[in-house]
Amino acid sequence: MRKLGTKLLHGYDRFAENSQTERSSTTDIGALAKQTASSGMMDAAELECLAQNMLESVRSGECLRGVEIGTFYGDTTLYCLNVLKGAGVRADWFTIDPFDLFTKEDDRHPQAHGLAQKYLSNLRASGFRSSVTTIVATSKQAARLIPDVIDFLIIDGDHSYEGCHFDLLNYAPKLRNGGGIFVDDYIPSYKGVTRACDDFFAAHANFKIIDKRWFVSARKL
């Protein structure tokens, strides 16, 4: 793991601003989903389903601890934090991505150069810095840094079978009962993701699939 500017030290950084939100605030999730959706990333329908699962994963009177594997520019991160803010929920959010510190330009990161700086710029401008712990590492390297109990999990990282299956096996068990999981790119062009999801959910009866289209949305029972 490498140092990034003056911030991301030894692979992770905890920002230190006040992250309290007012419960009276509101967010138009549909409009925000349309604004956030982009070609090649999550579309508006998928983002709305993600938000529904996430909000149903919030413990009454508490913050939501979320983990997002695969961050890219941080668009989904900021979408989730805005949804939670609108619901009056305090977020404790972990993002995991090797960014351009470990990744050469390839199919997963076609614009790898400058990716980390672009993400940090978006996060700094968002006002959510204190709510986010950024871990610059692969999900295998980061697993030990994640708390043992989380409320919500997004998997959109390594799209190989081995990578996605690792994330499911090592991160999904951290979900508390009632917590939600959301896996992106459950599509034929990513056979590793579809096979990993099929194998995992078939072997784990304590997860109930809520929705399965070009993504998988599920809840831990």
Image: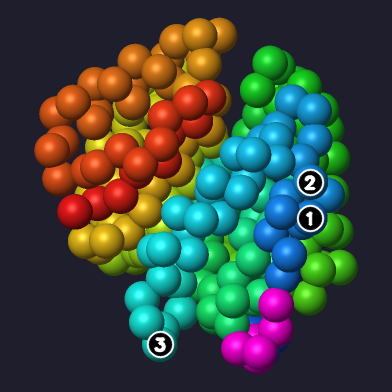
Q: What amino acid is at disc 3?
A: Gly
Q: Is residue 13 left or right of residue 66?
A: right
Q: What amino acid is at disc 2?
A: Lys
- Identify the residue at image location x=30%, y=50%: 219
Q: Does dot 1 land on a helix, a strand or a loop?
A: helix
Residue 139 in view in this figure: no
Q: Would you say the magenta stretch is mainly helix, strand or loop? A: loop
Residue marked by disc 3 = 61
Relative depth, front residue between 2 and 8: 8
Q: How many marks?
A: 3
Give the residues drawn in magenta, as a range. 21-26
Relative depth, front residue between 28 and 67: 28
Question: How far is the residue under mark 2 from the one under mark 3?
Answer: 29 Å
- Identify the residue at image location x=80%, y=35%: 38
Q: Which is more foreground, mark 1 or mark 3?
A: 1
Snapshot quadrant of residue 95? bottom right
- Identify the residue at image location x=71%, y=54%: 30
State the mark number for residue 31: 1
Crowd class of label 1 (few under 14; some 14 to 19; many from 20; radius 10 Å): few
Q: Are marks 1 and 2 in contact (CB under 8 Å)?
A: yes
Residue marked by disc 2 = 34
